[in-house]
Image: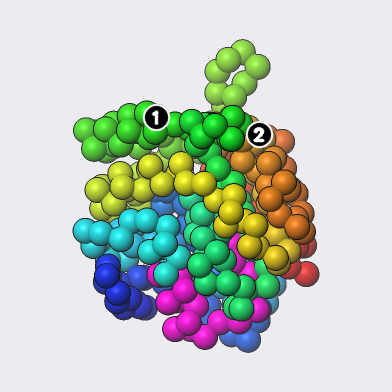
Amino acid sequence: MPMLNVGGDHPTEIYFTDSAGMGRPVVLVHGWPASEASWKQIGAVLQRAGHRVIAYDRRGFGRSGKPGSGFDYDTFAADLDALLCELDLVDVALVGFSMGGGEVARYVANHGTGRITAAGFIAAITPCLDATLPDNPDGAFTPDAAAEMQSGLLADPPGFLKGFLTNFYSVPTDDGGAKLMVPASEIDHSIMIAGQGNVNALAACIPLWLTDFRQDLAKLKVPALVIHGQGDQVVPFAASGARMPQFLDAVTMKPIPDGPHGLLASHPDEVAQALLAFLA
């Protein structure tokens, strides 16, 4: 298995995949509670189009190391930078899904754009979900909600994940219910992938969804793509994707009308084609 050893204050190993080749590199950053495996369908399309596709498991997730510390966005961005440097990647399109969009924003803020020439945010938690901030009334998450989710996850991981992932892959219906946009087997598969991670690492990441990335985004001066499901029940479009043009200089918007949060599984063709058009 390809592993990168990262040092510093929070050493660990980062598992990654690399299709290699001479094409423009696209680096894919997964969401919660997933792994690089969530990108398989999208990555295959990008690779067939000639791109070099790199994806990795966040520390504590998937097949990466399970350290007891380092679960913050500065460390995540440092891990990402270590990977880009190890592979000596340039002209990179850096694409993050959900909380992975936070890595994209924080990477740019902390490490600049010397290696990247495009950024993608898919169902991302940017710009800021914290509704308790006085200047962010359009947020859609609170510290109390984060604490409740942490408690639920730690008390009953399988039960919590089943409920969370059902919502993750569903859109609201006119009668007040919800419609699942993937086969039920996709939920079971996602629970299995989540089980590869360390439950304490998963729990430690939940409060990070409150992070304010508005100043990070102000440093992003490369073209950006925003793809977001308008039926997203986890990271509502109005609180996140719809607000991104306020903070980016050059942005292409791709709302998906019937899209849930889990777009990589529910709408892989639309996501892949939007990425290819953006990168063309």
Q: Position of residue 207 (x, y in %)?
A: 38, 42
Upstream in sequence: badge 1 or badge 2: 1
Kindly identify the amino acid type of the residue bearing the numbered disc 1. Answer: Ala
Do the CB atoms of the residues marked 1 and 2 lie less than 8 Å apart? Answer: no
Q: Is residue 198 above or below residue 179?
A: below
In this view, the residue farthest toward the front is 134
The C terminus lies in which quarter of the figure?
bottom right
The magenta span reads 79-95
Mark 2 sits on what residue? 238
In-front residue for pair 110/174? 110
Kindly identify the amino acid type of the residue bearing the numbered disc 2. Answer: Ala
Kindly state the secondary structure of the residue where label 1 is placed: helix
Q: Is residue 186 above or below residue 238?
A: below
- Disc 1 and disc 2: Cα gap in Å? 18 Å
Let me know if residue 152 appears in the view. yes
Mark 1 sits on what residue? 145
Q: Is residue 280 above or below residue 266?
A: below
Say if the magenta span includes residue 66.
no
In-front residue for pair 124/207? 207
Residue plotted at (77% across, 62% down)? 277
Kindly state the secondary structure of the residue where label 2 is placed: helix
Residue plotted at (63% across, 62% down)? 219
Q: Quadrant of residue 163?
A: top left
Q: How many neighbours does mark 2 have within 10 angstroms: few (below 14), some (14-19), or many (20 or more)?
A: some
Residue plotted at (24% across, 48% down)? 200
Let me know if residue 124 appears in the view. no
In-front residue for pair 276/98? 98
